[in-house]
Amino acid sequence: MIPLDRKKSLSVLLLAAFATAMLWPLIFGGEVHMFRDFGRYYAPVKKAYLERLAMGELCIWLPELNCGTPIHGSLVHAFLYPGNVLLFAGESLGWGLYFAAHLFLAGLGARALARKLGAEEEGAFAAAIAWAGSGYLVSQLNHVPYATVAAWAPVIVTLGLSVAEGKRRALPLLAVAFAMAALGGEPFTLLLTIVFLGILVLAGGFGPRIPALLSIGGAGFVAILLASPTLLPAWDVVPESARATGFEEDLAGFGSVHPLRLVTVLSPESMGRYQHRFSLVQSLFGREFLLEAHILLGLWFGAVGLIALPQAPVRRSRAARVLGITAGVCVLLSFGDYLGLAPLITKAVPGLSRFRYADKYWFIVALAAAPLIGLALPALRRRPGLILA
């Protein structure tokens, strides 16, 4: 038998190796990741203001973007996000380190969440790989703020559940994690994370509900103070944006996930989101499959996930039942126009019209499915005819 501490260390090392392998061409090969919005929007803007910072200039206005943009008040560019320091390593190496660090962080958070929910170390590692290599997270590498905040999500949920259990040492860490996600630049992903945490606290049986929610709210308030240098300027800029007035109803289902894509819940999402022009082959493999083969390394966890999910011990774990139900509801929401739910939900929930893309709910589906796989692993290993290391 391998001691638990050694298993934990091995899991962390393997997770680091996985994250490095995913971004090998950027970290060691000198390649530049220039896919979709990353190449035409996020990377050029970050490069412009980081170059000015390197010259000692505090860049709060970027004249090269849209005839002038208040970069400090634009949340998506995450001007003060501490992870930006990795980008000073160079255009290829810097982004390789940035993405690898966040995949590693995502895996650590998913591993801790699975352990919190009762998974063994092997199952926790499976959960880590499932989330860090999930189709949602990897496909969002071209949308930097989405991937950044999603990487912090399982960390926030794990710390929030520790707070719910009465562990006061987790409170300052939760506040910092909240602040990092707020600085990461994608508010809807953070909002979904908070809702997901709230559901687990209210229904998961982790401790007294009201004190837990008050403590988590207190950590959130501290996080707002910590992130205020970014949030206050954004408070002035956001009302002037197109998103402030909300999107038209016909855009509510934009990015609806075709029901057949359920088989890709934890496998690559074809490095993009073209659900309206649904083609099963293209959606599963994508036109970039061969060109982006290095990104797909180790990602075909989806098939194992579909086998594992029904094996999760939902009858014995209230938290597992909550995860399964939440994932199921979000699957239905992600179908959007295919079930006609997107316009109805957008009308029913105030403020939701400000956020497009029904496939954003896939974030919660994958986040909930990862620890469920960790919980299911022992059941899979005991099944006759299945041999899992």
Image (tube, grey):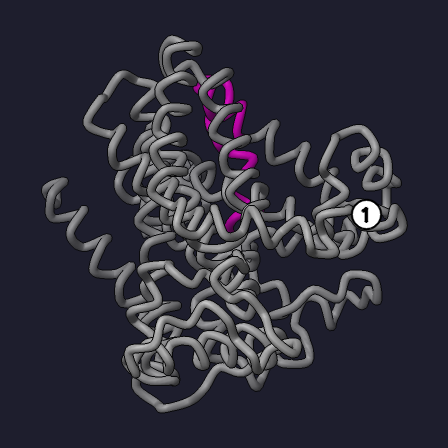
The overriding secondary structure of the stretch rendered in magenta is: helix
Tag 1 residue: 252
Q: Which residue is drawn at 54% across and 83% down?
A: 34
Q: Which amino acid does label 1 sit on?
A: Ala
Stretch of the chain drawn in magenta: 304-323
Q: Which residue is drawn at 33% across and 28% down?
A: 118
Quarter-of-image position of residue 331:
top right
Quarter-of-image position of residue 342:
top right
- Between 50 and 40, the one nearer to me in the picture: 50
Q: Is residue 22 above or below residue 244?
A: below
Q: Is residue 321 left or right of residue 288?
A: left
- Between 157 and 329, the one nearer to me in the picture: 157
Q: Magenta span has 322? A: yes
Q: Residues within 10 Å of mark 1 (few under 14, many from 20)?
A: many
Q: Is residue 31 above or below residue 125?
A: below
Q: Is residue 131 visible?
A: no
